[in-house]
Amino acid sequence: MRHRIGIVVFDGLTLLDASGPADVFHHADPTGEHYQVQFISPVGGAVTSSSGMTLADTIRAAEAQPLDTVLMTGGTSLVQRNHDPALLSAVESLAAGAQRVASVCTGAFVLAELGYLDERRATTHWRHSRTLAQWYPRIQVEPDVIHTQDGRYLTSAGVTAGIDLTLSIVEQDLGVDVAREVARELVMFMQRPGGQSQFSSALSGPPATNDQLRSMMETVIADPAAEHTVVSMAAMIGVSTRHLNRIFHAEVGNSPAQWLEQVRVDAARGLILEGHPITRVAQLCGLGTDESLRRAFAKHLGTTPSAFRQRFASTAL
């Protein structure tokens, strides 16, 4: 029996919130043997996205068949207290008998307004997480994670995180091998599990305003395993190490040595999740040895490389 999935859309939605998950389900089950995906809107017919592109022939919510999974898409217009009653009614009726009720990005605001997320863990786009927490204080908002699951309710961060969430659903339904193959087909970074940060720690701040510094940082990030040191980084932009420290503290907020180590830890996380042996990870990320990698993980992540691998061995939470 096919698993019926309803992707709820509305005028002003972010199109990728709908098309991304739909493509994941299609690539996971191209013959339609397991998944039946439908686009559903409050009144049916054509729906226009925020980019001006149109989804034609959506199904009217009142005419939709019972669903196994409901996926509420997002859009900036949902960050409000007075939601369209027709949209709320549509989601409420569709979710009544569903096994899973999920949201992408600001779609969490609709689930929150319906009370589904009360006393539960949830996330949304980082830009709106504080608002979600302020407006709905009964929700345990986790502002920095990719996606969450609490009971039958799943939420995800901004836009592309909906693809991560959907890969997690596919993994639950069809297994990790199918999810990995879909990620490869879509040229996606499969192993971005729900509990990971929405950001790379080394890249989460604003870009450097100094053109030379920004160029040097991009060079280091592109090849963290190269023999980078504070001296070599200073030489790249033709300044003394003392001046480089001053620039880094002013522009980045920490020292060049601290920043370099964080870049390498971020690279190591990705390498571990790609399945490389720990010793090889230490070499490829530029930290050199297993012990250096272990110390850096303890310092920046509060865990060990092996524990990190076990925790994030799949997309599951």
Image: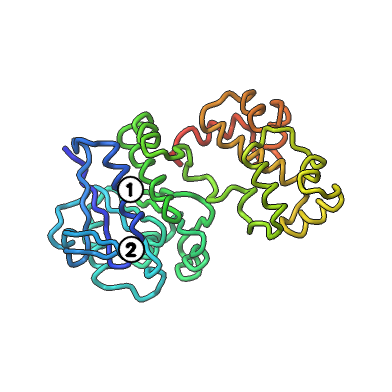
Mark 2: secondary structure: loop
Q: Which mark is residue 21?
A: 1
Decide: few, some or many residues near mark 1? Use Cα within 10 Å; few <14, some 14-19, many ≥20.
many
The x, y position of residue 53, in whole percent, is 29, 61
Looking at the image, is 248 positioned above or below residue 305? below
Q: Residue at x 51, y 36 (%)?
A: 312
Q: Amino acid type of disc 2?
A: Leu
Drawn side of residue 136 relative to residue 92, left or right: right
Drawn side of residue 22 relative to residue 121, left or right: left
> Of marks 1 and 2, which one's residue comes earlier in the chain?
2
Looking at the image, is 224 positioned above or below residue 94? above
Q: Amino acid type of disc 1?
A: Pro
Q: Is residue 97 visible?
A: yes
Q: Are marks 1 and 2 in contact (CB under 8 Å)?
A: no
The x, y position of residue 209, in whole percent, is 68, 60
Q: Which mark is residue 13?
A: 2
Q: Residue at x 17, y 64 (%)?
A: 44
